[in-house]
Image (cartoon, helix red, strand yellow):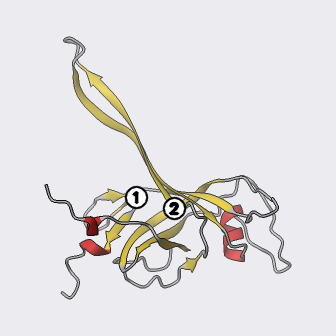
Amino acid sequence: MSLEAENVRVAVTGAVYSAPKTVTRPSSATSALTGYIDHGYIGDGGVTETRDRSTNQIRAWQNGALVREVVTESSMKYQFILLETKKENIELYYGGKVAANGSIKINPSKTGGRRMFAVDIIDEDDLIRVDIPDGEITEVGDQVYANGEAIGYEVTVQSYEITDDETGETYSAVKWYGSLDTTAGA
């Protein structure tokens, strides 16, 4: 057995970004995020990635033997709390536009539409980047106003499946692990 402590990663810090679907997506863990908005401080719980999967077991008539299990539903979500009260975060949370006078009209059914998201997870010199090419804020957390607590904007990004035009492969996100990149210097 080979044990290598240097392969253990910790999400020490990171960043969450979003962009209109018209900008150029990243192509690696370190490529520039041109046209993306940096959403600033994220709550100390970081970013939670959730992959859900439902299956259906197919059983044979003979002895009720399990012969196959197929995936019937799947989804991928990212949840985090935006800590900074700034225009971009208010618009993301409420799914609307902030007016010049600082107000926003709140319609609880508005999601703000589909956007691209990127999440950078940083451990010293190592970078893991998640590219979400088609995401939407589908859930928001409660607003809590309390003495001694930051006003946070909890959001959940639903990552939708897309199809790669070149390969025909479908996926909901791309994740690059900088420490696993064997193309560096090539």
| Disc assigned to residue 172 | 1
Identify the residue at image location x=72%, y=52%: 142
Mark before the other along the chain sequence, 2 or 1: 2
Which is more toward the observer, 120 or 163?
A: 120
Q: Residues within 10 Å of mark 1 (few under 14, many from 20)?
A: some
> Mark 2 = which residue?
47
Q: Is residue 91 left or right of residue 15?
A: right
Quarter of the picture containing the C terminus is bottom left
Identify the residue at image location x=35%, y=30%: 56
Q: Is residue 43 left or right of residue 21?
A: right
Tell me the mark number nearer the camera, choosing from 2 and 1. Answer: 2
Q: Residue furthest bottom?
A: 185
Q: In the rendering, at what x and y percent does residue 135 appear?
A: 51, 61
Q: In the rendering, at what x and y percent does residue 103 appear?
A: 84, 71
Identify the amino acid type marked 1: Ser
Identify the residue at image location x=40%, y=66%: 10
Q: Is residue 147 left or right of residue 128?
A: right
Which is more toward the observer, 118 or 104?
A: 118
When the figure is inspected, residue 69 is found, relative to residue 52, above or below; the finding is above
Instruction: Find numbered disc 1 in the image and state the secondary structure of the residue it sits on.
Output: loop
Q: Residues within 10 Å of mark 2 (few under 14, many from 20)?
A: many
Q: In the rendering, at what x and y percent does residue 98 appear?
A: 77, 73
Measured Cα–Cα span from mark 2 to mark 1? 17 Å
Q: Is residue 84 left or right of residue 57?
A: right
Identify the amino acid type marked 2: Val
